[in-house]
C-alpha cells in the first residue's frame, strides 16, 4: 500500500519543472560531448579504413602505430562516461554531475599529458564544468524534497 508521504514525493518529482537555463546548458553540453562521443565511436568502427586512406600521406608511419586504437578506445570510454553523466544529470540524478566531473577531469589531464594545447577544447570543458557545477551545487536543477515533519 502506498503511503501519503510516498505519494507526495512522487508528485513532487513528477511536477518539478527545471529552470530554462538548466535545460539550455545541459542541452549544449550534451550536444558538444555527444558529437565527440559519436566521432570517437565512428573512429573505432572505421579505424582500419581511415588508416588505410591516410597511409599514403603519412610518410613517417605515425598513423599506423599501435597507439591509435588505444587512443580511440580511451577517448570513446571517457566520452561515453561524460555523456552518461550528462544524461543522468538531465534526469535529475545528482550522481550524473559527479560522473561528468570525474570523466572530464581525467580527459583534461590526459589531454595535457599527451596532446598539444588547444584553447577551444580546454575552454569548452572547463566552462561546462564551471557552469554545470554552479547549477549542481545551487540545487536549482533538482526537485526539492518535501519535509514530512510538518
Image: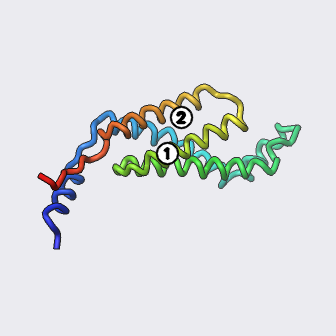
* Sooner in the amino-acid sequence: mark 2 or mark 1: 1
The residue positioned 61% from the left and 42% from the top of the image is: 107
Question: Residue 95: where, in percent of width, then height?
Answer: 42, 51
Question: Residue 128: where, in percent of width, then height?
Answer: 47, 34
**77 or 104: nearer the viewer:** 104
Q: Which residue is mark 2?
A: 125
Packing grade of label 1 (10 A; few <14, some 14-19, many >=20) is many
Q: Is residue 52 left or right of residue 89?
A: right
Question: Residue 139: where, in percent of width, then height?
Answer: 32, 40
> Mark on residue 108?
none
The residue positioned 30% from the left and 45% from the top of the image is: 142
Question: Residue 57: where, in percent of width, then height?
Answer: 82, 37
The residue positioned 77% from the left and 48% from the top of the image is: 67
SS state under label 1: helix
Packing grade of label 2 (10 A; few <14, some 14-19, many >=20) is some
**138 or 37: nearer the viewer:** 138
Q: Which residue is mark 1?
A: 100
| Quadrant of the drawing holding the N terminus | bottom left
The residue positioned 22% from the left and 53% from the top of the image is: 14
| Picture colour scheme | rainbow
Amino acid at each position: 500500500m502506498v503511503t501519503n508521504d510516498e505519494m507526495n514525493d512522487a508528485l513532487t518529482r513528477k511536477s518539478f519543472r527545471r529552470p530554462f537555463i538548466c535545460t539550455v546548458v545541459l542541452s549544449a553540453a550534451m550536444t558538444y560531448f555527444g558529437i565527440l562521443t559519436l566521432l570517437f565511436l565512428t573512429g573505432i568502427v572505421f579505424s582500419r579504413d581511415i588508416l588505410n586512406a591516410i597511409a599514403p600521406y603519412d610518410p613517417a608511419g605515425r598513423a599506423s602505430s599501435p597507439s591509435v586504437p588505444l587512443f580511440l578506445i580511451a577517448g570513446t570510454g571517457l566520452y561515453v562516461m561524460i555523456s552518461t553523466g550528462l544524461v543522468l544529470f538531465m534526469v535529475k540524478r545528482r550522481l550524473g554531475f559527479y560522473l561528468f566531473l570525474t570523466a572530464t577531469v581525467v580527459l583534461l589531464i590526459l589531454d595535457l599529458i599527451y596532446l598539444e594545447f588547444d584553447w577551444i577544447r580546454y575552454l569548452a570543458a572547463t566552462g561546462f564544468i564551471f557552469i554545470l557545477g554552479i547549477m549542481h551545487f545551487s540545487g536549482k536543477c533538482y526537485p526539492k524534497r518535501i519535509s514530512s515533519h510538518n
